[in-house]
Amino acid sequence: MNDDAMDLRSRNRQATREAISHAALSLAIEQGPNGLALVRVHDIATAAGVSPRTYNNYFSSREEAICSFQADQSRRAGRALRSRPADEPLDQAIITAVIELYTNPEPDKAGLRMIMSTPALEGEALKAFTMAEGPLAEAIAARTGTDPGRDLFPPVTAAAVAGAIRVAGRHWLEPGNTESFATTLRRALSFVFPAAPPEGPQDR
């Protein structure tokens, strides 16, 4: 199989994954506050235009399906940072990369509110956001010349960034908050920095 065919197959799989996730979240929202418990696999598959078997090939639970967009974003966090200019200051590089990744497109408030207000979904979303830490720590280490397996700076900074994203999401959903998610996220990340990488050898 050539590269073009592989790319097309990968795009098709991602499109199917996104269609299932969108259908699952939309159905849960339609059902109201306890919508998750009322949504069935058959309904999700029908709404997404796939078979229940195809659904099961992609996801093992409704929670995983609904939160897959957050998981996919988190997996791209390290790549987003690596794409920033090498001479860009670390704080600016991280803030810009994270804002572009998590606000393009801006989160759907109804969907995010459903996720944050449903314990099972909130737990799955926490797992999804945590996925960003490893790739992000490796990208931070690459930019700072540190070792993510031995130095604390990369993983601690990555964990702080992931935490800031979650807190920003909760704050953005507060009644009366009319600012964009990008603005809220930028303010949240500003409290993580100015974190600075260590200078010189670190104690082991």
Image: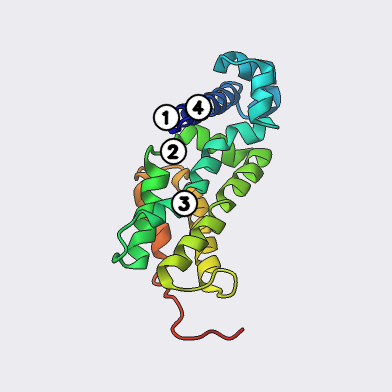
Cα separation between marks 1 and 4: 9 Å
**Which label was assigned to residue 133?**
none
User: In this picture, is 114 found above or below 131?
Assistant: above
The image quadrant that residue 197 belongs to is bottom left
Which of disc 3 and disc 1 is earlier in sequence?
1
Which of disc 2 and disc 4 is earlier in sequence?
4
The amino acid marked with disc number 4 is Arg
The residue tagged 1 is 4
User: In this picture, is 163 found above or below 36?
Assistant: below
The amino acid marked with disc number 2 is Pro
Cα separation between marks 4 and 2: 27 Å
The residue tagged 4 is 9
The quadrant of the image that shows the C terminus is bottom right
Mark 1 in CB contact with mark 3 (< 8 angstroms)? no
Q: Position of residue 180 (x, y in %)?
A: 35, 44
Q: Which circle, 1 or 4, is nearer the viewer? A: 1
The amino acid marked with disc number 1 is Asp
Q: Is residue 52 left or right of residue 75?
A: right
The image quadrant that residue 106 belongs to is top left
Cα separation between marks 1 and 3: 25 Å
Cα separation between marks 2 and 3: 16 Å
The residue tagged 3 is 77
Which of disc 4 and disc 1 is earlier in sequence?
1
The amino acid marked with disc number 3 is Ala
The residue tagged 2 is 107
